[in-house]
Amino acid sequence: MAEPASRSGLPHWLVKWGDASWRLIAIGVVVYFAFQLLKSVSVVAIAVILALFLASVLWSPVRWLVDKANWPPMLASLTTMILAVALLFGGIALLVPQIASNFDSLSSDVTTAWEDLKGWLIDGPLDLSEEQIDSFLESSLEQLRNVESQSILGGATAVAEFFSGLFLAVIATFFVLKDGRSMLSKLLERLPDDRSRQVETGVRVGWRTLSQYMGGIALVGLFDAVVIAIGLLVVGVPLVLPLATLVFFGAFFPLIGAFLSGLVAVAVAFVNGGWVDGLIILGVVIAVQQFEGDVVMPLVFGKTLRLHPLVILLGVAAGGLAFGLFGAFLAVPLIGMVVSVREALGDGDDDSYLSLTRG
């Protein structure tokens, strides 16, 4: 039976999909120009977002000093930030000399592992030529250079952008810690009651999600680093501290960072101990990642940041392509915040497309 025509004489399905297409085009145009605007002020935008991330880590001790110890907000914020910076630089002062002293050895091991892999690609079952491998590497590096030149850290002004953005992030962190609560209260006072409740709920859920992510991902990274370091020590692989440090920071880039840092550990084990040690460390890395995904992350994050692995992978990739290293770092928690806030402001059973991001 033919579908009846609408008043315009067109089939209903055509009118329906036409209306949806125009709306999608309008949304696409808005998103495109918003993205271009954001890229034009990427240093400021990323600095502000990074400030929110830093403030979420320091928020609890500042609130304790203000609410429990009756410290003035300015003093509590300054003291907490100074102690955090001192702790950070203290850790760097302990790690950097040991990592630097082993850097040449680590670089040499990775290079040797690559040469062995390259030899297997040429002489093994894939039967690739050296020209094919070099051409693939050159094209990949060229793409990376093009992406990097367009990112926040690309071009001749990279150093100036980095330090100006870092300075802005520190200042913004201080004011969020000092005045964040009062600024939110003043905003809520100017909104209608129903909208005020929605905004308060959204901010509260988003802030809790961000705080949980920052603390949780640090715990996940520490777990990965400690367990893999134990495996390296048992097998007798050198460069344990540099590799464990690399694994820890790799955890802040979900899936991709853990995979790449694990490959470096496997490469070092293979070069220094042969195939057996390499396969053992590979097994340790796979086991750690599997245990992390099935046990550690659900315990640490619960349902708050339960995202599908494909969503995480695409988010990290898109963030990295758009805004470089910082974009890759910021992508996953921002997606988690958006999904959590949408669910909190929904009617309970979320049947929106955002619910498909849950793992």
Image (spheres, rainbow, N blue to C red):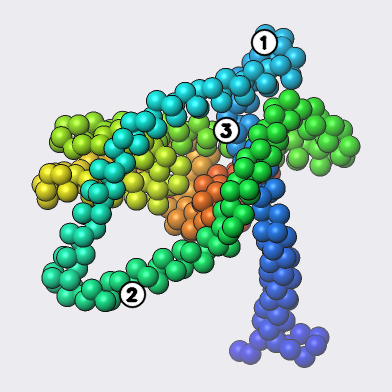
Q: Residue at x 52, y 35 (%)?
A: 214
Cα distance in 3D space between marks 2 and 3: 44 Å
Residue 339 or 12: which is nearer the viewer? 339
Q: Residues within 10 Å of mark 3 (few under 14, many from 20)?
A: many
Picture layout, residue 85 above or below residue 339: above
Taking the image as shown, residue 191 lies to the left or right of residue 306, namely: right
Left or right of 161? Residue 181 is: right
Residue 211: numbered disc: 3
Residue lying at the far top in this picture: please name it: 69
Query: Vertically, is 144 above or below 113?
Result: below
Q: Quadrant of residue 296?
A: top left
- Going by the numbered disc 1, the residue's amino acid type is Lys
- At a point 44% along the width and 69% down the height, the residue shown is 142
- Observer-nearest of 235 and 82: 82
Picture coordinates of residue 314, whole percent (x, y) = 48, 58
User: Which circle marks residue 115 in the picture?
Assistant: none
Assign a secondary structure to mark 3.
Answer: helix
Which residue is nearer to you in this view: 55 or 269?
269
* Image location (x, y in percent) of residue 231: 21, 35
Q: Work out how far the residue at label 3 is from the one at label 1, CA to CA, in angstroms.
A: 20 Å
| Eye-nearest disc, 1 or 2 | 2
Q: Choose the circle earlier in sequence order: 3 or 1.
A: 1
For the image, the number of numbered tags is 3
Which amino acid, by three-letter code, is at mark 2? Ser
Residue of label 2: 135
